[in-house]
Image (cartoon, rainbow, N blue to C red):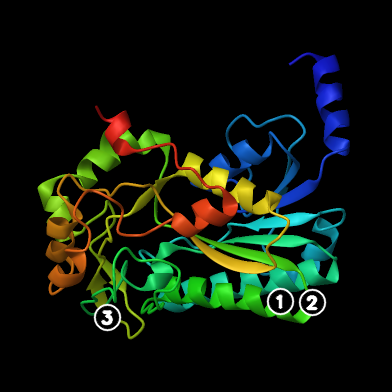
């Protein structure tokens, strides 16, 4: 990039809102940052610095969000926060470490945001808050498609940390008036996943044994090992980044929660057939879905945020 172009970009950024993205170097975070850079001046806070080419003008800070003393300086001039940083699954980590890390970092971000008069927090929760993804017992949805009114019944440390994280944000809105939005992405797929991981997920064995390209067992809350299960809903990281942008741009919401998913399911079979293979006894509720639609509904996000998913594995893997 020419020096004059760089100076123009930096000068332009000075007139834009300044957004903090935590966990912006991660698997999903990179795609969110890429989208937000088109609209905001972005500061990224992460335990790791990027080892890839970054956009001029975007600032990267190496920081441990569990250290609350560092956050006030970091939030100087920040108008909104996108909080993605978390241990992203219970697989491969001790349960108490997942829960402690995710809860403390979320609490610290919220407290610092209130102290610094930040206007909005967009929290990356998870479809795992429902409880199906890492369940210790067989679970059957109360109804399908699942929407925001469906009760959350998480059993693992990750799902619990996301469900409680949403409550922390709601409490912050009640307490201080800060605008808070929790987005619940279903299984996140990045563009490089389609040729291998998605094909793997779509095999008959993957659909019936629920392996979803992760180790078979996780450490349970009681120290036991349990299989991961998959709810067959997914979202492309680029669509999720769109949802984050829409949440930031919304000026009406004080607090709310939204599922963010693709319109279709991660299954070649109709959901009425595929879902009961994963969750025995769910035949009656699954029969309400007669096609390939996602078992998790994003209709609320479409109606209120204007979310429009653009990516489907069916269009990419032709």
Q: Element under label 1?
A: helix
Answer with the quarter of the image where residue 100 lies.
Answer: bottom right
**Is 65 in front, or is 41?**
41
Q: Nearer the viewer, mark 3 or mark 1?
A: 1
Residue behind mark 1:
172
x and y percent of residue 158 in the render? 44, 70
How far is disc 3 from disc 2 in space, using C-alphas? 40 Å
Within 10 Å of disc 3 (Cα), the crowding (few <14, some 14-19, many 20+) is: few
**Pair 3/2: label in front:** 2
Residue 45 in view of the camera: no
Kindly identify the residue that appears in the image at 65 percent across and 69 percent down. 255
The quarter of the image holding the N terminus is: top right
In the image, 119 versus 7, the foreground residue is: 119
Residue beneath the point at 61% across and 38% down: 35
- In this picture, residue 39 sits left or right of residue 52: right
In this rendering, the answer to whether 224 lies above or below 241 is: below
Badge 3 or badge 2: first in the primary sequence: 2
Q: Residues within 10 Å of mark 1 (few under 14, many from 20)?
A: many
Q: Residue at x 64, y 76 (%)?
A: 170
Mark sitting on residue 224: 3
- State the image quarter where residue 216 is shown: bottom left
Occupied quadrant, residue 147: bottom left
Q: Is residue 205 above or below residue 52?
A: below
Question: Which residue corresponds to mark 2?
Answer: 176
Percent coordinates x, y for residue 126 in the rendering: 46, 63
Horizontally, is 124 left or right of 91 in the view? right
Q: CA distance from mark 1 to mark 2?
A: 6 Å
């Amino acid at each position: 990039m020419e020096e004059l172009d760089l100076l123009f970009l930096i000068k332009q950024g000075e007139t834009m809102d300044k957004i903090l993205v935590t966990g912006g170097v991660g698997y999903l975070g990179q795609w969110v940052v890429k989208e937000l850079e088109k609209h905001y001046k972005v500061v990224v806070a992460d335990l790791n610095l990027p080892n890839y080419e970054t956009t001029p003008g975007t600032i990267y800070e190496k920081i441990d969000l569990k250290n609350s003393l560092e956050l006030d300086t970091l939030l100087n001039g920040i108008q909104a926060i996108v909080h993605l940083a978390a241990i992203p699954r219970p697989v491969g980590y001790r349960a108490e470490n997942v829960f402690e890390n995710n809860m403390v970092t979320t609490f610290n971000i919220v407290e610092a945001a209130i102290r610094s008069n930040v206007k909005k927090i967009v929290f990356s929760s998870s479809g795992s808050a429902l409880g199906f993804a890492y369940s210790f017992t067989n679970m059957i949805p109360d109804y399908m498609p699942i929407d925001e009114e469906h009760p959350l019944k998480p059993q693992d440390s990750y799902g619990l940390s996301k469900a409680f994280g949403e409550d922390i944000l709601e409490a912050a809105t009640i307490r201080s008036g800060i605008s808070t939005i929790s987005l619940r992405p279903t299984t996140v797929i990045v563009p490089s996943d389609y040729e291998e991981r998605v094909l793997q997920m779509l095999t008959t064995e993957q659909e019936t044994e629920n392996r979803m390209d992760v180790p078979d067992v996780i450490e349970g809350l009681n120290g036991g090992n349990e299989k991961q299960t998959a709810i067959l809903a997914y979202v492309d990281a680029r669509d999720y980044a769109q949802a984050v942008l829409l949440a930031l741009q919304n000026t009406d919401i004080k607090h709310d929660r939204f599922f963010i998913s693709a319109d279709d399911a991660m299954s070649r079979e109709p959901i009425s057939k595929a879902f009961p293979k994963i969750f025995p006894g769910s035949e009656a509720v699954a029969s309400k879905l007669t096609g390939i639609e996602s078992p998790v509904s994003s209709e609320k996000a479409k109606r209120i945020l204007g979310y429009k998913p653009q990516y489907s594995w069916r269009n990419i893997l032709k």
